[in-house]
Image: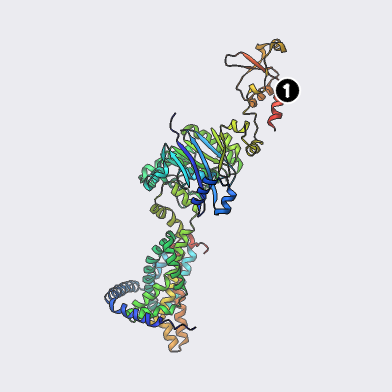
Amino acid sequence: MEFPPIPLESWIDAAIAWLVVRGGPIFDVIGKTLSTLELLLRDALRGLPPYVMIPLLVAFPLFKRRFRTAALLLAALLLIWNLELWREAMQTVSLVLIAAGLSLGIAVPLGILAAESRLARSIIEPVLDYMQTTPAFVYLIPAVLFFGVGTVPGILATMAFALPPPIRATSLGIAEVDPQIVEAAVAFGSSRRQLLLKIKLPLALPYIWVGVNQCIMMSLSMVVIASLIGATGLGTRVVEGLSQFDIGKGVEAGVAVVAVAIALDRLFAAGGGKDGSKPAM
Amino acid sequence: MPEPAVECRHVWKIFGDKAREAFAAIAREGLGKDEVAKRFGCVIGVADASFAIEVGEIFCIMGLSGSGKSTLVRHINRLIEPTSGHVLIHGEDINAKSANELRRLRAEKIGMVFQHMALFPHRSVRDNVAYGLEVRGMDRKRRWAMAAEKLALVRLAGWESRYPHELSGGMQQRVGLARALAADPDILLMDEPFSALDPLIRRQLQDEFIALAGVVKKTTLFITHDLDEAIRLGHRIAIMRDGRLIQMGPPEDIVLHPADDYVAEFVKGISRLKFLTAEKVMDPWSPAAGASSVSLADCTRVRLEADVASVIALAAQSEKTIVVVDGENRPVGIVTPRGLLRAIQASAG
């Protein structure tokens, strides 16, 4: 017995056609908001020349007396400046910060929900599995369909790609809180909300910071890929290097991406737990 | 008779998906734990526990691990709901309370101390102690003042802004005790509070607790697996086995009149001398037996109800004959070295 092929393709085409027509105005609003945000941040990051920005950024870990971190950060930033990729790097960073910031704004509440409600967990878990097994490039297609080419679809595809790790980290962090401590908090009369805000979230914080860090790193890798659909920045240089077979140019841009990764990692480790310590995951 | 502070009436707790069916079958057919496990896949945590704790009383529940004592204590503040039965706090059924009333009760009326301290690692000692006050909305100044007062009570003044990991185990448990006392609750639930500590510290904390109990006079339900501890601390003791309270009474009853072989096995290692009175070991006072030759002026006198341990101490101090006297100071018996040796022999089992 033979089954006819499921017309998945035509279903999805129909659904997307419907969405593009009906959702047009909503997509417009989202697109305008995102591009305005990104422009503001990009201009702010570029507003200060590197010789002002670099000391400012390095001062942050220095202030917390973390000299190794400061040294590493300084080296990474100087390298970017030296490669004359500062403007591109700042563009990339602005895309990363917007995408990671927005996806964290969604991910942390979802992670809490997944930890607190069995129903929510049974819905969120399989969706995350699906999202994490989907190749990064697949996110580019619907983004382009709804928002055309440019920074906005780049940000959205990046958000989708960077969303799962912080959801998982938050949910795991809350689930890992010692049940004896939770019991004690209940025995002293906590409400559910107090239990979450005063006990569970603070204790899950090291895990949540791991999620923040991963979210930023994944955003960076996706932003580079998203240059294929017009999200300009360091990735544009990589793509140019590829298409023009200019290996030197491509590798240079690639080195700058790594330097940005190191800088972001160190900066956010400085913001996180003590000496950037992370729990084993 | 005044109302008991805490009362359990026929509390049953059965764990498992089919707890209700299992309970119905137990009520109908009187199944034992093995049959319940086989037929319903359920575990009996607490079986038909009934007891009442008077205001100000220290009531110890003693049992080995798995006997259900920790499960039972969690019914008192409804961390666990019974499958059947009632838990009354000052005569009010705690399982009839709304979520709000229950939280108030937990924050204000019932303090709890846990075996593994369960302090909040991210909060300072002061904020640990003040937690129950904080969740009921007391302002910072007042709750910190109350926390400081309770920390002084457990001799931890000056440690307010430290964190739990900076303290030794014994100090951590004193913080746990201060936290339980912070709201001045009527009732203290102590779930093996000293079990995780090493023996010297345990003994020291027991002494401190006895002293403290004399000051704060809280109705206390004290869970322990250590019969010595139960005897030292408890006004009354209940022995728990397989979810059942198999014997309940003052320490001397448990030690001198164990209800069954299981309890007898437990009390075997306990010296009974403290619970034997002079009356039990004396020879009767009979002038015919030559007692008249004893000069009463040259004797050590002890009361009928004096415990044998102290009589032995007296005998060891001097050669004088020990005469037992009644309430009106009339001689009623004489304690001979032979009588004492018999008592020691008997109490050694």
x%, y% of residue B69? Answer: 54, 43
Identify which residue is drawn at 48% across, 69% down: A72
Residue B234 visible within the image: no
Relative side of A160 to B69, left or right? left
| B335 in relation to A10, above or below | above
- Nearest the viewer among B319 and B237 is B237
Q: Is residue A170 visible?
A: yes
Vertical placement of residue A15 versus B134, above or below: below
Q: Secondary structure at mark 1?
A: helix
Q: Nearer the viewer, residue B244 or B167?
A: B244
**Where's residue B97, x and y in %?**
39, 44
Query: Which residue shows up at 48% across the image and 84% down it?
Result: A2
Which residue position holds label 1?
Answer: B338
Tell me which corner region of the image, top left, top right, bottom left or bottom right, holds residue B146: top left
Instruction: Say which quarter of the image contains residue A116.
Output: bottom left
Tell me the subunit letter for badge 1: B
Residue B16 image point, x, y percent? 52, 53
* Residue B205 higher or lower than B347, as above or below: below
